[in-house]
Image: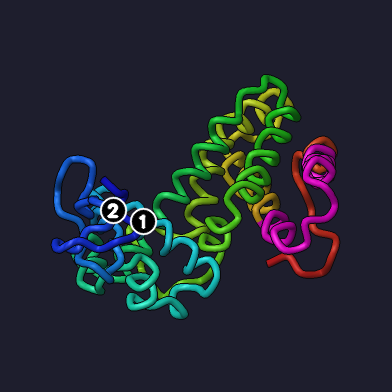
Amino acid sequence: MTARPPGRLHKNGDVNGSSGGSADGTAGPPAGRERRPARRGSRVRMTGKQRREQLLDIGRTLFAERGYDGTSVEEIAAKAGVSKPVVYEHFGGKEGLYAVVVDREMQLLLDMVTGALTGGHPRVLLEEAAFALLDYIETSTDGFRILVRDSPVAQSTGTFASLISDIATQVEDILGLEFKSRGFDPKLAPMYSQMLVGMVALTGQWWLEVRKPKKAEVAAHLVNLAWHGLEGMERRPRLMGDRKN
């Protein structure tokens, strides 16, 4: 018997006796058509918790870049790939999302500062407090930008000023003991702790933008001013000018 020439078509449309199907005998695509790739599985849906975290991350970035007024629910939803009602479902709107972002950042900063106060010597404690704030600015720059930015939203968690007050409360007990040991009135410790923490916080706002000098040098200068200021304090400070009231 003579061999059939290669590529010859048979009655059923097969080439060289092949059925055109796959190895398991299933029918292949009609002649003249390319086999289409299998359709990929649909995108995995996020859980409610995952979606909430995604929206918080997106909102945090946008609030840091543009502020509260410059950020819209539409943009948040678009970046998350969802519709506006999803944002409202999780947070009730932009205000609710903003409040959660601020609350988280305030708690993070408070935890970092209070957790750092472990040194025994008062000067070491000042260094630890200064480093804690500068560490937060360095590692959570977006969060700090949000905290120090003015917002029209009245929040139950308060403002940056109230956060500084909370941190100062953690410091005042330590400062009170130092005052007592030096013969100063410990009742003045709350006021002095506000002064010290406020000085560090405002310096941190300035350093947020310039990032010079290096963090350790900034901390050293802060402690230099604070410590030597405390060291040379008068027990009964007096005003030198004419104004007394």
Q: Name the disc covering residue 93, or none.
A: none
Of helix, strand and loop, which mostly describes the magenta segment? helix
Name the quadrant containing residue 127: top right
Query: Which colouring convention does the figure follow?
Result: rainbow
Q: Is residue 209 magenta?
A: yes
Q: The residue under label 2 is which amino acid type?
A: Asn
Task: Judge the density around disc 2: few (<14), some (14-19), many (≥20) Cα neighbours within 10 Å.
Answer: some
Element type where label 1 sits in the image = loop
Query: Along the line of sight, which residue is nearer the eye, 23 or 225?
Result: 23
- Rendered view: 43 above or below 226: below
Residue 219 % position (x, y): 78, 42
Tell me what residue is drawn at x 27 percent, y 69 percent: 33
Tell me what residue is drawn at x 72 percent, y 63 percent: 209
Element type where label 2 sits in the image = loop
* Residue designated by label 2: 16
Q: Name the disc covering residue 6, or none.
A: 1
The magenta stretch spans which residues?
A: 202-228
Tell me what residue is drawn at x 26 percent, y 56 percent: 38
Whether label 2 touches label 1, CB < 8 Å: yes
Query: From the viewer's perspective, is 101 left or right of 182?
Result: left
Q: The residue under label 1 is which amino acid type?
A: Pro
